[in-house]
Image (cartoon, coloured by chain):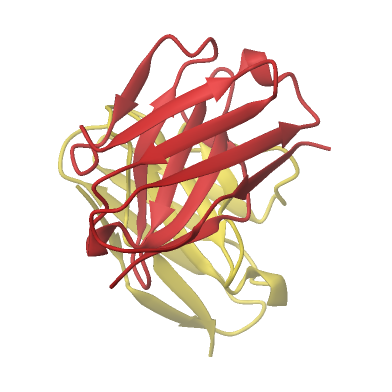
Amino acid sequence: VLTQSPATLSVSPGERATLSCRASQSLGNKLAWYQQKPGQAPRLLIYDTSTGATGIPARFSGSGSGTEFTLTISSLQSEDFAVYSCQQYYTWPWTFGQGTKVEIK
Amino acid sequence: EVQVVESGGGLVQPGGSLRLSCTASGFTFTNYPMHWVRQAPGKGLECVSRISSGGDSAQYADSVKGRFTISRDNSKNTLYLQMGSLRAEDTAVYYCARRHLTVGVLDNWGQGTLVTVSS
């Protein structure tokens, strides 16, 4: 089970956002992050805990290991307001967290 | 440009069947494992099924095992999901997604197709 917190994060543009994902068992580094905007498909941001996917801006970074993981957006841009979900691929079936909504403060 | 496009969603009665399709382009389809992921209204994402690049191996979430069948036709660059014995809780947007070649993540997704199970 993946538990994300907070459920909603209110942030002003230009500020830093820190999102958490906690796993019920150790995942090693098999943790990814996705961004999803309303009416759109998820977009891969980060995999292997901290590796940026192709074309992802450097303001997105991931960290952690084992059961505690973090996605940091260093300086929020207008296009970053969305729902962020973590995903484990340590074991099948792969599972996702319930998501953190990042909204404009 | 890598693209996957789903089709086949719609309204179906409980107990009914539906077949979803996903047509891929812009990459060598035969090289990639493929997945179906769904998202119920207001809920998180759920991996439903996956299939190997050659189509000889498939796995399912417990919630759909025995009711859904994943398959692919590599000659047509198309992925399928045959859904049977549908229940209200199967109502969701169903996404087709390409698995990254070396890492267990989904690096390209379609826009999804909505399946509504209701009488």
| Residue B112 falls left or right of residue B93 | right
Up the image or down, A22 lies above or below B79; here it is below
| Residue A92 x %, y % | 28, 28
Residue A88 at least partly seen: no
Q: Residue lying farthest bottom?
A: A105
Q: Nearer the viewer, residue A58 or A104?
A: A104
Task: Examine the rendered structure and indicate whether residue A35 appears above or below residue A54.
Answer: below
Q: Quadrant of residue B92?
A: bottom left
> From the viewer's perspective, is residue B55 above or below residue A102?
above
Rendering quarter of residue A25: top left
Name the residue: 59% across, 70% down: A39
Q: Nearer the viewer, residue A49 or A37?
A: A37
- Give the colour in which the image draws chain A: yellow
Q: Residue at x 61, y 39 (%)?
A: B22
**The quarter of the displayed image where residue B119 is located:** bottom left
Q: Position of residue A41 (x, y in %)?
A: 59, 56
Disc count in the image? 0
Would residue A96 be visible to someone looking at this image? yes
Q: Position of residue B75 (x, y in %)?
A: 69, 15
Q: Which chain is red?
A: B
